[in-house]
Each structure stands twice: as C-alpha cells, then as structure tokens.
Amino acid sequence: MRVVSGIQPTGNLHLGNYLGAIKNWVKMQDQCECLFFLADLHAISMPHDPAELSASTREMAAALIAAGVDADKSILFNQARVPAHAELQWLLNGTARMGWLNRMTQFKDKAGKNREGSSIALFAYPVLQAADVLLYQATHVPVGEDQKQHLELARDIAAKFNTDYDTGLFPLPEPYITGSATRVMSLRNGEAKMSKSDPSDASRINMTDDDDVISQKIRKAKSDADVLPSELDGLEGRAEARNLVNIYAATANMEPQAVLNQFAGQGFGAFKPALAELLVETLRPIRERFVDLKQDQAATDALLKKGAEKAAALAKPTLDATYNALGL
Ligand code: ADP
Ligand code: NA
C-alpha cells in the first residue's frame, strides 16, 4: 500500500488543524508507505501573499514534524521543490478533458460568479492533484467527502492515458478510508468550526498556547449545567458538550462512548479539569518542538529538502515513462 496525501499550508495552527488533519498523518505513517506533501503549488490558484505562503509552508512543516511525522518513516516535502509534479500535470493536461473539469463542483464553489476572472490554475488544479498521486503510482489516497470527485477524476485520467497510449503505467488509486475525521468546533459556539479566522481567540486553542492559556480556555469554554450522560444520544442538542467530549476522545485516541463510560454522571466542573490536563500534557511536547523548529528554519528546510530528494527519486521512473509513452 502506497499512500500519497497533501495538505494546504496554513499558518496560525490550532487544535482543529491538529486533531482534524495533522494527527491523522502521524497515525497513517505506521500503517503504510506514505508520501506527505505541503500543497504549495495549489496555493497559487487563488490570490495569495508570497511571503505569507512561504511562512505558512514552513509553519505547517514544523507542526507536522513536531507532532510526530517522522522523516525515517515517511517522505515529507513541499510540492514546489519536486518539479515532477508540475511536469506531470502538463503531460496529463493532454489527457484530461474540458468536460470533466467543467463538472468539478469545487471549481464552481470557489470561482463563484467570477468564472471569467478565475485563474486557469483554479480550473486545472484537479489535474495537478491527479499528477500528485499518479506520479508515485499511489495505490491509495485518503479522501474526505469534498475530495471524492477529484479522486474520480484522477482515476479517469489514469484509465484514459493507459488506454490511449496502450500502457499499464498508471494504477488506478483507491480511496483510503481513515474513519470519520474529527471536526473540532469553536469553544464559544458548538455550531461553528474552530477556525483561525474566528475573531475570538477564546474560541480556539492555538498550537502555541502555553499550559495556563490552554487550561483557562477550557475552563471558560461554553458547556451546560447537566451531567455527562451514559449514552451518546444524551448529547443531542448539546453541541458544546458534545464538542468537549469529542475533543477528549480524539486527543486520547478513544471513542466518544468510551469517554462517556468514564465520565457519565459527572458535571463539567469535574470534566473540564480532566480535559484541560489531557490537552496540556498532549500539546506541551508538541508545542515545545514546534516553537524550537519555528526558530530554527534551517532545520525544517533541511528536512524538507531531504524529503524532496527522496520524492524526486521515486517520481523519476514514472515521469520518464510518461514522456516516453507520449513520444517526447
Ligand atoms: P482554518 O479553518 O482554521 O482556516 P484550514 O482551512 O487552513 O484551517 O485547514 C487546514 C487543515 O486543517 C485542513 O485539512 C482542515 O480540514 C483541517 N481543519 C481546519 N479546521 C478544522 C476543524 N475545526 N476541525 C477539524 N479539522 C480542521
Ligand atoms: Na479554511
């Protein structure tokens, strides 16, 4: 099993990014051969600030390494440093059909009414996503609901290329179901996603928050006056309570029901200190490594450079074979 997965580089990382995205990679690297990349080439499909993009790319890389993505277990790199991604995309542009891309709902969502003013990159980036995985002959790609259509496109491109050029070059990648991703909600409003763009800092736990700040934010988190129920249906209509239970479960690698088994009958006066302690103990070592890495950019850059070299070496035979199949 070879898995390829990318993540958009983001700055100002928070608990939602950690539990919803970063932590999954740390788990995955023990289950399969993994190539992980920061999707910095995708970022240029929308208006962006170049200085912010390079800072966010480094920050996300530092967070991944701090959280446990291990260069000895998996290959971690940023897309822009492996030119084979952009090259293969161009080669696959000859196979991808306008009609296929016209059907991509994410383009329609992101372009909105400004279709004519959208970049060609925004329209074509599902082809880059196809190149990202086909380049390594990935067998599996972790996909959320919003990416299923793009994986289908990668399969269509691979199949048409194989047929048109009478080659078995590209295996069709399968979806890799990693279980339902944790959706972390705001600490101030259980109906809103925890997000860096929420103006209230108390709504989220930042990856850089120290022990006291974490404890204080959990203490002040919105909850309710009821006790924790013994069954999950007892959390229906209690979005904030449900969120705190989910955060505990995801952090401790437990099922939410197992958290209830442990805390049923107790109120938030007892549950919140336990949650705060769990978060403090889990996040402290990650934060310490993260802050060190942010100060030592050269260390992160060196790791990414090594990763890019390994990725490029794996990509080369496939890229060469693609040129060859096309008569180039
Ligand atoms: P934000 O919403 O703070 O702007 P991004 O959109 O940059 O975060 O997300 C980067 C990654 O983190 C994505 O994989 C996204 O799915 C994940 N993520 C962001 N917020 C959450 C959240 N509240 N719960 C779970 N995952 C999240
Ligand atoms: Na976002």
Image: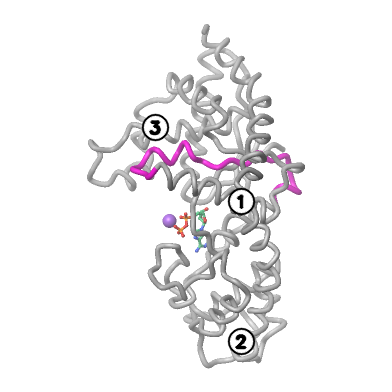
The answer to whether mark 2 and mark 3 are in CB contact below 8 A is no
- Element marked by disc 1: helix
- Observer-side mark, 2 or 3, equals 3
Report x, y in % for residue 220: 51, 84
- Observer-side mark, 3 or 1, equals 1
Residue at horizontal 67%, vertical 68%? 284
Residue type at tag 1: Ala
Identify the disc placed on residue 62: 1
Residue type at tag 3: Ala
Part of the protein shown in magenta = 27-49
Residue 29 counted in the magenta span? yes
- Element marked by disc 2: loop
Report x, y in % for residue 178: 64, 52
- Element marked by disc 3: helix
Please tell me in which quadrant of the rendered image residue 21 appears.
bottom right
Is 181 rendered above or below residue 135?
Answer: below
Q: CA distance from mark 3 to mark 1?
A: 29 Å
